[in-house]
Amino acid sequence: MTEKNKQIQQAKGVSRSPTPLYHQIYLLLRDKIISGELRFGERVPSEHQLVALYSVSRITAKRALDELAAESLVTRHRGQGTLVKYERPAGPVVAEGMRSLMQNMLSIAQATDVQVISLETIAVPLWLAADLELTEQDAVQHAVRVRYQGDAPFSCVESYVPGDIASGIAEADLVKKPLLALIEQSGHILARATQAITAVLADNIMADRLQVKVGCALLKVRRIVFDTNDRPVEYINIFYRPDLYQLNVAMARSEGGDDTFWSSADLNI
């Protein structure tokens, strides 16, 4: 698809969506800035250009640019236009495969700082008991942490660990080491994990923790980790800012019988 056709399709999408026009344009431009398509110091389309491109009023175009400025993504100067202010980090944190779960967590820990929001021992929630193979009488350690890449939070982590495994884990430990490393220190060697990956919208709590707007798209990973005895040792929900974290899947051509298809040896985390 040519750039012109791409812009036409975007304009059609803007006109058909029930979301306010100014917010649609704001989201399109924001994505271009966050992804690096529009880089630091580059000029953003002017109000006149947005009017022509998306067939909207100048007031609508101005409001979209004002939204970007309010989020400190651009600066607006009379006579100079609107310039990108946002500087992308040197590179997003990249996950590289289930086989290197511990190495990946350790590399993230080395590249980030962690803030413990809460840490408490609670009765296992009813919705969680089956996943952790616990009974209603069992306890779990519930922790909420935010990881920072530089000054920017890039993930919020909510974890549940069976009480007998987490009995020796304190807040200071969570600041220094990844939780999985602490679990292994307790004598439970990690063997495998299952996970589900989806997209969610930030609610007011998650928006505050990750410094994004309410309704911003986030990447959610739900994971259950098992030890060598096939016991569930951790249930975790991780919410990532997609501009600071990405998932890579390595795929290879696989041939079997009369069928040729693509397969992935690793589901990245």
Image (cartoon, rainbow, N blue to C red):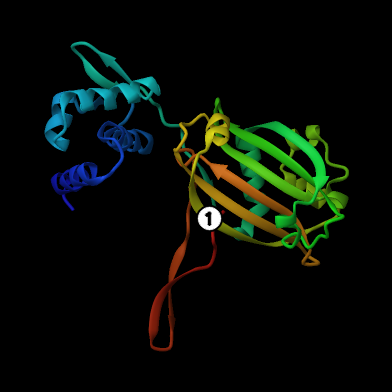
Q: Give amino acid for label 1.
A: Ile
Estimate the x, y position of residue 253 in percent, counting from the top left.
41, 72
Q: Residue furthest left?
A: 52
Q: Is the residue 261 above or below the residue 122 in the image?
A: below
Q: Where, by quadrant of the figure, is residue 42 drawn? A: top left
Decide: is 124 above or below 168: below
x, y percentage for residue 150? 56, 27
Residue 195, given in percent of the width and then of the height, sits at 60, 59
Q: Name the residue rendered at 74%, 48% in the picture.
A: 160
| Residue 159 position within the rendered picture, expressed as x and y whole percent measured from the top left | 70, 46
Q: Residues within 10 Å of mark 1 (few under 14, many from 20)?
A: some
Q: Is residue 40 above or below residue 224?
A: above
Task: State the residue in front, 39 or 135.
Answer: 135
- View extreme (bottom): residue: 257
Q: Is residue 166 left or right of residue 6?
A: right
Q: Secondary structure at mark 1?
A: strand
Along the horizontal axis of the image, is 226 left or right of 263? right
Q: Residue at x 64, y 42 (%)?
A: 157
Q: In the rendered view, tell whether residue 184 sits above or below residue 52.
A: below
Residue lying at 28% horizontally and 27% vertically, measured from the top left = 64
The residue carrying mark 1 is 197
Quadrant in which residue 229 is drawn: bottom right
| The residue positioned farthest toward the top in the image shown | 78
Q: How many marks?
A: 1
Q: Residue at position x 75%, y 47% from top?
A: 181
